[in-house]
Image: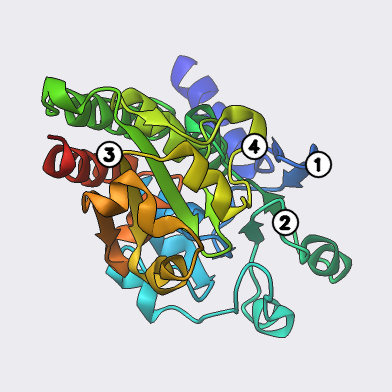
């Protein structure tokens, strides 16, 4: 009798409809799926990297032009950028969901065409952990195997990078230029939080926001001990008025990051431990 009951239960489970999956994205929009999406288009590099680090790279069927890690995603169809996505190309890929930044203007257009959209945009460390959990839920990966595991690697890696720094590096006053504009990484950004954990002082206060566009004169007045900048922004920086007199420039305490390093540094995702190591190496080499 017990075997018969167990067999009935197995048959019922096989015939029962798959449970619905519901997710609240960063717009506050609730998105419902009949099952975990198998065909995903990602239009934000940090989300692409997170999905792959969670072990589900094979579900990606298209990415934005800036998604370049891991190497396997370079073979996927490219659907434009976050600000200028190719809507037709996305629709043609028949995705179960499109994941993108909350700042993307494509959400409403894609939804009007019947596509499901999940908007996620991490800006600080807590956001990164939260977004990993959201993606883990979307992919139906238990936290212990997915988001929590990835976050422990990030957190311990950042701590290890901080512990590698010599005492003389502490309290250096740092300016981090995130992109041309200039746009700076403020204290409240994920980059700013990493710098704080490394024991240095960010000259861009939290009150200005995570990534404010600043007047170059602000940096002249702040007179940082160390400047971090990507090679893509270096030429523009050379033209900023008055920068020749900044202590960091006069004393050659400027770290110029390669495009590959910059990609690691400016993406709030699973490679933040590597980003911390890159920043720690810069700080250690310039602290004296």
- Dot 3, crowdedness within 10 Å: few (<14), some or many (≥20)? many
- In the structure shown, which secondary structural element does the residue marked by tag 1 occupy? loop
Q: Is residue 201 left or right of residue 161?
A: right
- In the structure shown, which secondary structural element does the residue marked by tag 2 occupy? strand
100 or 246, nearer to the observer: 246
Check the picture and name the quadrant holding the C terminus. Answer: top left
- Residue pointed to by mark 3: 276
- Select label 2 or label 3 by which is in front: 3
Tags 1 and 2 touching, CB below 8 Å: yes
The residue that appears at 58% across and 46% down in the rendered structure is 211
Q: Is residue 271 visible?
A: no
Tags 4 and 2 touching, CB below 8 Å: no
**Image height of 159 relative to 242, above or below:** above
Q: CA distance from mark 3 to mark 1?
A: 33 Å
- Residue pointed to by mark 2: 117
Disc nearer the start of the sequence (4/1): 1
- Residue pointed to by mark 1: 29
The residue that appears at 40% across and 55% down in the rendered structure is 49
């Amino acid at each position: 009798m017990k075997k018969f009951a167990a067999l009935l239960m197995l048959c019922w489970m096989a015939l029962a409809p798959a449970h619905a999956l519901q997710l609240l994205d960063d717009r506050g929009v609730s998105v419902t799926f009949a099952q975990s999406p198998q065909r995903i288009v990602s239009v934000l590099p940090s989300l692409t990297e997170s999905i792959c680090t969670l072990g589900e790279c094979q579900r990606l069927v298209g990415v934005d032009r800036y998604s370049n890690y891991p190497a396997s995603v370079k073979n996927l169809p490219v659907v434009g950028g976050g600000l200028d996505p190719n809507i037709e190309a996305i629709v043609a890929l028949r995705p179960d969901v499109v994941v993108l930044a909350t700042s993307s203007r494509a959400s409403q257009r894609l939804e009007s065409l019947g596509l499901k959209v999940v908007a996620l945009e991490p800006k600080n460390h807590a956001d990164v952990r939260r977004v990993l959990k959201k993606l883990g839920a979307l992919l139906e990966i238990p936290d212990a195997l997915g988001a929590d595991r990835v976050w422990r690697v990030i957190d311990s890696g950042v701590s290890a990078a901080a512990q590698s720094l010599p005492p003389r590096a502490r309290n250096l006053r740092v300016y981090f230029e995130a992109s041309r504009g200039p746009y700076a990484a403020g204290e409240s950004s994920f980059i700013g939080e990493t710098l704080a954990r490394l024991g240095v002082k960010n000259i861009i206060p939290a009150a200005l926001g995570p990534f404010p566009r600043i007047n170059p004169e602000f940096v002249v007045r702040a007179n940082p001990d160390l400047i971090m900048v990507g090679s893509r922004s270096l030429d523009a920086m050379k033209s900023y008025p008055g920068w020749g007199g900044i202590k960091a420039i006069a004393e050659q305490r400027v770290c110029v990051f390669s495009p590959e390093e910059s990609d690691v540094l400016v993406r709030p995702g699973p490679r933040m431990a590597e980003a911390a190591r890159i920043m720690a190496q810069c700080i250690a080499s310039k602290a004296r």
